[in-house]
Image (spheres, rainbow, N blue to C red):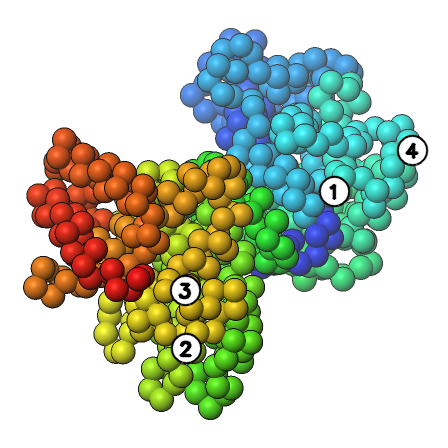
Amino acid sequence: MIDPTQAIAFSLASTSGAYALLVGSGISRSAGIPTGWDITLELVKKLALLNGHTPAKPEDWYRETYKKAPDYAELLELVTQTPTERQQLLRSYWEASDAERERGLKQPTTAHRRIADLVSLGTIKVIITTNFDRLLETALADVGIVPTVISTVDQIKGAMPLIHCKCCVIKVHGDYLDTRIRNTPAELEKYEPELDRLLDRVFDEFGLISCGWSADWDVALSAAIDRAPSRRFAMYWATRGTVGDRGQALIAARAGTVVPIKNADQFFEEVYASVKALHEFAKPHPISKEIALANLKQYVASSNYAVQLEDLVLGEAEKAERVVRDYAFPMKGGPTPDADSFTKRIHAYAAATETITAMAAIGGYWATPNHKTLWRRALEIVYIAPDDNGSYHAWVGAAHYPAMILFYSVGVAAVSAENYALLAELFSAEAERANRTLTAVEVLPPICAFEDNHGPTQFLNGYLKRRLAMNEYLRDQLRALFKRIHPQDKAYNRAFDKFEMLVSLAFLWRAKRTEANFWTPPGLWFMHDENRNSIHADIAKSLSEEKENSPYASGIFSDDWADASNRLVLLKEQAPTRFGGLFF
């Protein structure tokens, strides 16, 4: 059987605005607002004091003196003569003194705050309360909601219809600043016809969630619930202990559900958290790249949105993976690769990953240390190990494109932000190939994915016969995403070249390549003398001067600065010989 608190959350989330809250003194208990019994005991103490007694158990003294149990309403009638006197006597119980305010007393509780949050979500529109205090109104104001408050018959006449109210608070016993508050049995036994009609509408048209209300004293309010003809929505009765006879009768009459709770604060905290989670779950996936990017910028800016950021990024990665996996991209038995079919397939892959790629450029650039594993996981989700057996080499290589462009987008962003911890994490992402678990730097460089670049140089329209056709294509495709980061092409090209040089260096380390078996995927950096020399010099300087503190010696292409320096020298010495024939 479903937990009743979860049932309430489902009811609220699925039928927004269809439930009314009925709350009593129990929701204000933790604020230091006394209940009727608390006030009763306090009045008994004062009465005993006036009679020359200071009893340890005031209720026992009252029974012995008056031959009956102390009664809140009777005591008020006994010690005051008019409603105005009662209001003045009682207001000190609800208004916070300076000392109480400093201690956080008589201020909105967690229960009041979460009720206000539920109203803000649109799940609650009507609140009935027997409380005189204004803690609910304060909590609502703090989230920017000014409720329609009804505490007198006059206010009923001028109130907006409930359907048009953002929130309506019905204070059936009045407001503590109004002398017409209801306290005595006579006052609680019968309501004015106007209030009865309003309550009849509420209890007929809305479901009901009660918390902190016992029903024991409120004859007129109980009668209003009992006579409601409708049972279209459920009734939930949240209680800390045993429900009294009157409450049990109401629950039975409306086929209600008793919800045992520890206290009102925890109850409304749990209800709000569950409703909010259901609202988040029900949200449609971002329908456009622009919406996704707007959400990403908001979530990246604050650690308070860590969960939302993860859901957004990994959700978009999963969406891209599903599109790529489910799309008709046969590895074998399909069309023989040619310029038109190959280019069309690359463009289709690009369209499927357009949003996650754009998100990666922003998210990678602004990534904090807490985000580095997020982008590695996104890459591992998008990567799909292609079936090499009997497949066209061009199609196998093309199947790497979704992960490849995501790898490049995050990588160039990380280089641009000098976020080398993110880069090291990205390089270590796992990728399956031919039943082997490799790393991203061993699988996703274009010349690795396309097996000696077979495919793009032959079939990619606009890049035919170029030795590093896919590298150039990736550079050109990503340029627009980095326009704000690098307004000038020269700076962007250098960041791109640096990323590819670090990939070449990382491959040497991950694939355990030495001078004897030197090979590493080339990048466009090799063709750009100025960038190649300056990038190489910058890395060498960092390793020489910072040694073990150099960011390049922290898992990018070695964990040791001396080893990293040796690999850098190896690349500089061997690349011209090994790569020369590729370009000339």
Looking at marks 3 and 1 on the same chain, the residue that comes earlier in the sequence is marked by 1
Looking at marks 1 and 2 on the same chain, the residue that comes earlier in the sequence is marked by 1
Q: Do residues under tags 2 and 3 come within 8 Å of each other at their CB atoms?
A: no
117 lies above or below 38: below
339 lies above or below 237: below
User: Which of label 2 and label 3 is nearer to you?
Assistant: 3
Residue 394: which disc? Answer: 2
Q: Amino acid at mark 3?
A: Arg
Looking at marks 2 and 3 on the same chain, the residue that comes earlier in the sequence is marked by 2
Residue at the (49%, 54%) spot, across then down? 476
**Crowding at mark 4 (Cα within 10 Å: few <14, some 14-19, many 20+):** few
Is residue 34 shown left or right of residue 474?
A: right
User: Which of label 4 and label 3 is nearer to you?
Assistant: 3
Place of residue 384 in the rendered image (x, y in percent of width and height, measured from the top left)? 39, 71
Measure the C-alpha gap from mark 4 to mark 3: 81 Å
Measure the C-alpha gap from mark 2 to mark 3: 16 Å
Place of residue 566 in the rendered image (x, y in percent of width and height, measured from the top left)? 10, 48
Measure the C-alpha gap from mark 3 to mark 1: 69 Å
Q: Do residues under tags 4 and 2 come within 8 Å of each other at their CB atoms?
A: no
Q: Amino acid at mark 2?
A: Ala
Q: Amino acid at mark 4?
A: Lys
> Circle 3 sits in a helix, a strand or a loop, which is it?
loop
- Disc 1 marks which residue? 126
Measure the C-alpha gap from mark 4 to mark 1: 17 Å
**Crowding at mark 1 (Cα within 10 Å: few <14, some 14-19, many 20+):** many
- Disc 4 marks which residue? 157
Residue 466: which disc? Answer: 3
- Which residue in the rendered view is the most extreme toward the front? 584
Q: Do residues under tags 4 and 3 come within 8 Å of each other at their CB atoms?
A: no
Place of residue 243 in the rendered image (x, y in percent of width and height, measured from the top left)? 58, 49
Residue at the (24%, 60%) spot, across then down? 579
